[in-house]
Image (cartoon, coloured by chain):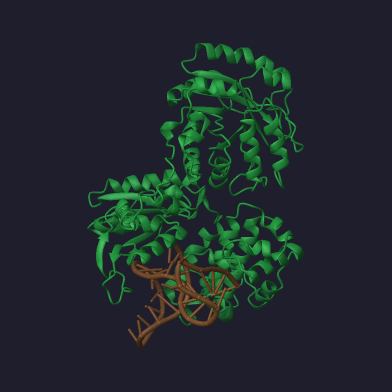
Chain colours: A green, B brown
Amino acid sequence: MTNDEIATLLEEFADLLEAQDVEYKPRAYRRAAENIRDHPESVETLAADGEDAVASIDRVGDAIASKVVEYVETGTIEELDELRAELPVEMDALTSVDGVGPKTVGTLYEELGIETLDDLEAAAEAGDIQEVSGFGAKTEANILDGIDFARQAHERSLLGAAIPQGEAVRDYLRDLPTVERAELAGSIRRWRPTVGDVDVLAASEDAQAVVDSFTDWPEADDVIEAGTGKASVRAGGVRVDLRVVAPEAFGSALQYFTGSWDHNVTLRNRAIERELKMNEYGVFDVSDVENPDSKRAGERVAGVTEEEMYDAVGLPWIPPELREDRGEIVAAAEGDLPELLTAADVCGDLHVHTDWSDGTESIRSMVEGATRFGHDYIAITDHATGPGMVGGVGLDDADIREQLPDLRAVADDADITVFAGIEANIATDGSVSVAGDVLAELDFVVASPHAGLDGDGTDRLVAAVKHPEVDAIGHPTGRRLNERNGLEIDIDRLASVAAAHDTALEINATPQRLDLAGRAVKTAIDAGAPIVINTDAHRTSSYEFVRYGVHTARRGWATPGDVLNTRDSGEIASFLG
DNA sequence: GCCGTTTTCGGCCCGACTGTTTTCAGTCG
């Protein structure tokens, strides 16, 4: 039972309550759900320790904690079942239709008995929906339009898919003569591993012209809505939201729409303490204002740039990746923000495959590709055979010894340093799939879990960390975004052992993985464990994924000094020696 | 239902857009 599962259940609870016009509770359930989903430990495990342990999670109180424990123990929540019986609808599916929320679902069930997407489609096609009070022909047509999109997976998009789309629309907007500035905003600017949509912000004196050009964007498949200051389109299965603001409010809008929500709440409270009001239009001095509730009351003291916004509340600018309300505002106030690493700091890739295992290119081709990419060194780490290596892609000990002379020969010719390595498998008992004397002949050993990727993996990984020949743990949890959650790991314990044994923990930059995640990276760094950012490239075109790893590291507050492969090849060699 | 260097009771972010409305409700971010 994953945290995500529990969170989804609480969100259904919230929707059902909201459909019945219950006030405030829905928000309480949603905030609890969000914090449970993001909780670093397994909430199922917490629940075994009782309600108090669950209630220790922020925004989770006694009532919700007892429901979570009930769910973990019995597999069901009585009160939720009662709500479902009163409103027996496929809430998740129905609310994924654009413009349909819990209240609409409630009304359509009461009036027309609609329970499923199929019911909804049939009612819309029959013209029944526009007969319901409060609904009209237009609403009915919009619902019909949105059903197909809702049926297609309404999963969140991978950052690796959303970023290229976002950058394309951003650059398209920047090229418009009416646009002064354009930036991505929202979770994509914070580089969250998955995003619900692409948010883009533009500064212009002529909002209507920008909206018109945006809806004409050649890559847009469909226009969802278009107003005077904002518009939404679908492009390649992703929803892209545009907002246009006046140039003098670009900084405040960018700050506001970048979020996170919790970061902005903390920031806004800090503003209130200083008799300031902070919103998407700027920072306003309301110390002399009788009614500060109106949205632009008081003298405007900031808003053109983000730097100005933070400066107005006595803070330095905070990088978007840190804006998750995990202590960044306190750190900023005390001058303790980390000097985050950048893509330019990374000078090598220590996890690369070739056609000796499941890569698509030769050793030489991968080395040349890395050279063109600008790396100073790489480690060739083909798969060793072992659990999870199906179809004979993995190298056995004899294969590894056979590959080694080839590898050394390419290395001798190369313009960059080439380390001879292997990606060994970590079995469920923590053993490593390659003989110790073979590993000892290699320069770099990354050990990774590839099978049995559920349950608690801490002991398993700790055993691998302690192995004398293992230099790094690859994709530690084994998660694949939108597919599987991977191992649960006590990252505190793993990291402290890793620190003691000088074993690096990998941020695997493959967009489907991004493993470790930012929050775990921060814990690992705090414990003193070295981090290594690798692409796990199976072809030369994948070297560019390194930026997703870099920004994941930034989400974990990483400085260049925390990351192994910011060091030059000589320093790497001595780390390995 | 949750939470508190304003608080254990009385508040909960708020503005834009849409569609349906005679002044607003629902959705969304």
Where residue A418 appears, as percent x and y from the top left, is: 54, 19
Nearer-the-camera pick, A198 or A131 = A198
**Is residue A165 visible to us here?**
yes
Is residue A165 positioned above or below B15 on the image? above
Q: Is residue A201 above or below residue A167?
A: below
Q: Residue at x 67, y 72 (%)?
A: A80
| Residue A123 in view, yes or no | no
Expressed as whole percent of the image width and height from the top left, the position of residue A286 reads 29, 69
The count of marks equals 0
Tell me where residue A26 sits by quadrant: bottom right
The residue positioned 29% from the left and 65% from the top of the image is: A284
x, y (%) of residue A86?
65, 78
Q: Identify the residue shown where x is 44% and y is 53%.
A: A330
Q: Position of residue A328 (x, y in %)?
A: 45, 51
Could you tell me which quadrant the C terminus of chain A lies in?
Answer: top right
At 60% from the left edge and 59% from the top edge, which residue is drawn?
A36
In the image, A142 versus A319, the foreground residue is A319
- In the picture, measured across the screen, residue A190 lies left or right of residue A364, that is left
Identify the image quadrant of the N terminus of chain A: bottom right
Looking at the image, residue A129 lies above or below residue A398: below
Lateral position of residue A91 relative to residue A52, left or right:
left
